[in-house]
Image: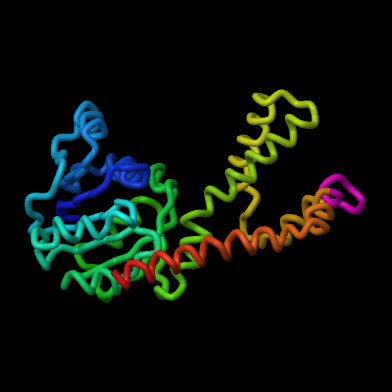
């Protein structure tokens, strides 16, 4: 793989996760880091990164990996549109922001991603959509370094954002509530956190080739403790609670997308 200029713009949680994932192949990528926060820039420099900038002067080639917040996009376009050459691949990880929104401002090739923070450990799965067909600048190949990728129709991205982009928060929110329940039932909080943390780390080993319903059936036994808990979830409309949470996230993604397209 030829060395590629990769410009990571926005070094918040997601930008840092990309940086962590790409760190081990720094020799194959020429990483350029753009961050407006002075404290973050100082930390990056202390960690040994050299190409750290507060703003963009000009980007003539390579790939932009845009990790800013969606509500900062208009300012980004206003300040940088004329500084970005049309040969540059623009890669957006902004929730709710469509390829169409970028096409209205740029003539560039656009790829839209919905990663989550697991990319830092190179165990991510990255859904993507794009407005071109070839693997321009080998970027899909580069993304596969961080885990695996799959292309989807963009019409599914509101659901993908809710389930996969926000998904870790659902699981950790549930985990937090499990810890709280254990504490309320008499367990020390530190012990509860150890149990739940180990539970989470064991889950990937349970999935295998079985579907989720089969796993539940294998764990529970008639009139056992698991069945009692499952019955309580069902009696309290657990499926409705989950559906409405996902639906709310989807609706918010749609709202963001419409707002961006109308500005």
Residue at image x 64%, y 64%?
Answer: 243
Q: Which residues are magenta?
A: 221-228
Residue visible at 34% across and 69% down in the picture: 98
Quadrant containing the C terminus is bottom left
Q: Is residue 226 magenta?
A: yes
Residue at position x 30%, y 62% in the image: 140
Q: Position of residue 195 (x, y in %)?
A: 67, 32
- Which percent across, then down, holds residue 43? 25, 29
Picture quadrant of residue 182: top right
When the figure is inspected, residue 148 is found, relative to residue 182, above or below; the finding is: below
Q: Nearer the viewer, residue 59 or 79?
A: 79
Residue 173 quadrant: top right
Looking at the image, residue 130 sits to the left or right of residue 117; the answer is left
| Residue 172 drawn at (x, y percent) | 58, 43
Residue 118 falls left or right of residue 65:
right
List x then y, in percent, for residue 19. Answer: 29, 43
| Position of the N terminus by quadrant | bottom left
Query: Furthest-right residue in view?
Result: 223
> In this view of the protein, can residue 217 be seen by the observer?
no
């Amino acid at each position: 793989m030829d060395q590629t200029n990769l410009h990571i713009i926005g070094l918040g949680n997601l930008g840092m996760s990309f940086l962590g994932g790409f760190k081990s192949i720094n020799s194959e990528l020429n990483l350029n880091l753009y961050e407006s926060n002075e404290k973050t820039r100082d930390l990056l420099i202390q960690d040994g990164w050299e190409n750290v900038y507060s703003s963009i002067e000009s980007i003539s080639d390579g790939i932009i990996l845009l990790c800013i917040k969606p509500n900062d996009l208009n300012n980004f376009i206003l300040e940088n549109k004329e500084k970005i050459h049309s040969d540059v691949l623009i890669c957006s990880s902004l929730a709710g922001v469509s390829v169409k929104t970028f096409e209205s401002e740029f003539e560039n090739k656009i790829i839209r991603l919905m990663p989550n923070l697991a990319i830092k450990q190179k165990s991510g799965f990255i859904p993507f959509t794009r407005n071109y067909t070839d693997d321009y600048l080998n970027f899909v190949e580069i993304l596969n370094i961080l885990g695996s990728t799959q292309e989807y129709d963009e019409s599914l991205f509101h659901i993908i954002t809710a389930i996969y982009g926000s998904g870790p928060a659902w699981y950790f929110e549930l985990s937090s509530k499990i810890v709280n329940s254990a504490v309320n039932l008499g367990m020390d909080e530190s012990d509860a956190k150890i149990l739940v943390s180990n539970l989470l780390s064991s889950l990937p080993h349970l999935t295998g080739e079985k579907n989720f319903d089969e796993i539940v059936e294998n764990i529970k036994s008639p009139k056992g403790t698991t069945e009692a808990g499952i019955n309580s979830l069902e009696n309290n409309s657990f499926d409705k609670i989950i559906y409405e949470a996902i639906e709310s996230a989807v609706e918010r993604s749609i709202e963001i997308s419409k707002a961006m397209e109308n500005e």
